[in-house]
């Protein structure tokens, strides 16, 4: 469908061997069955607990349970061969995900079970999980060592520590607030039996080019990107098992198509590559593959403007611009937004890592100027309340569909911003450039 719409808009195929498609080879490992219990009390897979599978991981486990607060190294003590329960806080000054894993691995834990922190209001946990599946690029390797990794629903903590004399509700409240937490061993054992299935799979990037008008700028291609994939079929929520992905990211693949249609027959000074990437939800796989195996000369890619993380559900008066001060793309975005009466800002929630979680990131890692956007809001405003609610009810859930409330004026405003920005970047005399001293340029 996307390839046909690109063709109808007058783009030229830019995939493998003169086609619209760049095939991205992958490996998939999924959990096809799970029986998990704590102290002989069952935990519902995907509702109470989920796991992150990897090849060669243990598929059976029968080990003691140790609760260790935030799982700082000093708090672990003797946890060798145990399932360690950790509160998954995102607070500064407390262990991060990577630090908890490193500490548990160094201490010889058999499993690291992280409580999804309900106090992380910026992006609250969402249960059930759609499925338990790991996908990676063929020829690479997923994480494949250390303790088994699982995520625990805070509502199920009482089941896991039952009989310990501790109150799960108080532990969760204290952990959510960043207060000191105790360390103790539970009386029961953590038992798990998994069935896994591994397969070689592939999915395509869809790529089309709008040729440029100026031969002198032929080696300065601007990539405009969004991602094709959503979650697809998964664990039902309110009776619905199709995770639609309307705002994540189907609407912005459609916006790429619409821009291609608007510019049919005219083009810009520079060539523009329209890229609908696959595998974003599983680790930016399509974008990573394209950057590593570009279908045009790597040196001819001047920039990427990526569309993702956009939620037109309240008025557009403030726009977060990723890498705002790192490249001249930030200046372009600031100029276009300012002319529309839209303020711009740096990411106000860096703890979410949004810059690294969408398809602009592989371009930045490769030293290519890139940017992306998030609808901003004033803290405490009605817009913030709408945004927070969407992350509870819409994000990566079946309810991200066409029936959800959408602010159509906000959508129109962003589309106009994007059309204008694309024209400015593709037509101006100089291609996008890094700014001197940008910390992103040297990042791995």
Image (spheres, rainbow, N blue to C red):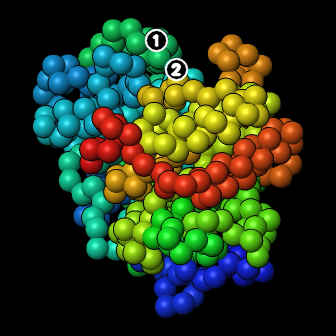
Seen as rendered, the residue at the extreme bottom is: 17
| Residue 318 sits above or below residue 74 on the image | below
Query: For mark 2, does the 10 Å Cα neighbourhood hold few (<14), some (14 to 19), or many (20 or more) residues?
Result: many
Q: Secondary structure at mark 1?
A: loop
Above or below residue 259? Residue 320 is: above
Q: Nearer the viewer, residue 179 or 267?
A: 267
Q: Residue at x 46, y 60 (%)?
A: 302
Q: Residues within 10 Å of mark 1 (few under 14, many from 20)?
A: some
Q: Residue at x 64, y 36 (%)?
A: 335
> Which disc is residue 177 wearing?
1
Residue 204 point in image, percent of width and height:
54, 76
Q: Position of residue 173 (x, y in %)?
A: 49, 13
Quadrant containing the N terminus is: bottom right
| Residue drawn 33% across the image and 9% down it | 180
Q: Secondary structure at mark 2?
A: loop
Q: CA distance from mark 2 to mark 1?
A: 7 Å
Look at mark 2 in the image and give the residue it sits on: 119
Label 2–label 1 contact, CB within 8 A: yes
Regarding residue 396, the answer to whether it shows in the image is no
286 vs 64, left or right, is right
Mark closest to the chain's N terminus, 2 or 1: 2
Residue 74: horizontal and vertical position, in percent?
15, 19
Q: Return the mark for residue 230.
A: none
């Amino acid at each position: 469908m996307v390839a046909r719409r690109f063709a109808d808009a007058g783009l030229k195929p830019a995939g493998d061997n003169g086609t619209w498609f760049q095939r991205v080879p992958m490996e998939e490992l999924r959990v096809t069955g799970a029986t998990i219990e704590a102290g002989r009390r069952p935990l519902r897979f995907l509702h109470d607990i989920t796991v992150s599978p990897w090849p060669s991981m243990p598929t059976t486990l029968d080990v003691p349970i140790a609760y260790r607060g935030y799982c700082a190294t000093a708090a672990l003590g003797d946890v060798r061969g145990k399932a360690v329960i950790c509160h998954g806080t995102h607070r500064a000054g407390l262990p991060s995900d990577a630090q908890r894993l490193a500490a548990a691995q160094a201490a010889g834990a058999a499993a690291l079970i992280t409580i999804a922190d309900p106090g992380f209001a910026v992006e609250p946990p969402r249960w059930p999980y759609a499925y338990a599946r790991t996908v990676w690029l063929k020829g690479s390797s997923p994480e494949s060592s250390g303790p088994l990794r699982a995520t625990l629903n805070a509502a199920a903590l009482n089941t896991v520590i039952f009989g310990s004399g501790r109150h799960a509700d108080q532990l969760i409240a204290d952990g959510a607030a960043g207060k000191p937490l105790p360390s103790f061993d539970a009386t029961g054992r953590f038992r798990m039996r998994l069935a896994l299935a591994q397969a070689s799979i592939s999915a395509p990037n869809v790529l089309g080019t709008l040729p440029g008008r100026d031969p002198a700028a032929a080696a300065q291609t601007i990539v405009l990107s969004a991602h094709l994939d959503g979650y697809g079929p998964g664990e039902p929520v309110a009776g619905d098992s199709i995770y639609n992905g309307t705002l994540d990211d189907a609407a912005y693949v459609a916006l790429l198509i619409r821009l291609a249609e608007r510019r049919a027959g005219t083009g810009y000074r520079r060539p523009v590559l329209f890229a609908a990437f696959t595998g974003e939800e599983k680790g930016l796989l399509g974008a990573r593959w394209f950057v590593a195996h570009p279908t045009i000369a790597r040196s001819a890619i001047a920039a990427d403007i990526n569309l993702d993380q956009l939620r037109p559900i309240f008025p557009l008066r403030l726009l977060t611009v990723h890498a705002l001060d790192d490249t001249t793309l930030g200046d372009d975005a600031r100029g276009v937004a300012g002319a529309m009466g839209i303020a711009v800002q740096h990411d106000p929630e860096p703890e979410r890592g949004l810059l690294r979680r969408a398809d602009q990131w592989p371009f930045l890692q490769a030293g290519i100027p890139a940017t992306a956007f998030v609808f901003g809001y004033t803290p405490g405003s009605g817009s913030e309340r709408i945004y927070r609610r969407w992350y509870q009810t819409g994000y990566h859930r079946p309810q991200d569909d066409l029936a959800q409330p959408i602010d159509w004026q906000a959508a129109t405003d962003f589309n106009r911003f994007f059309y204008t920005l694309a024209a400015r970047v593709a037509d101006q005399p100089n291609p996008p450039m890094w700014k001197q001293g940008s910390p992103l340029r040297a990042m791995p």
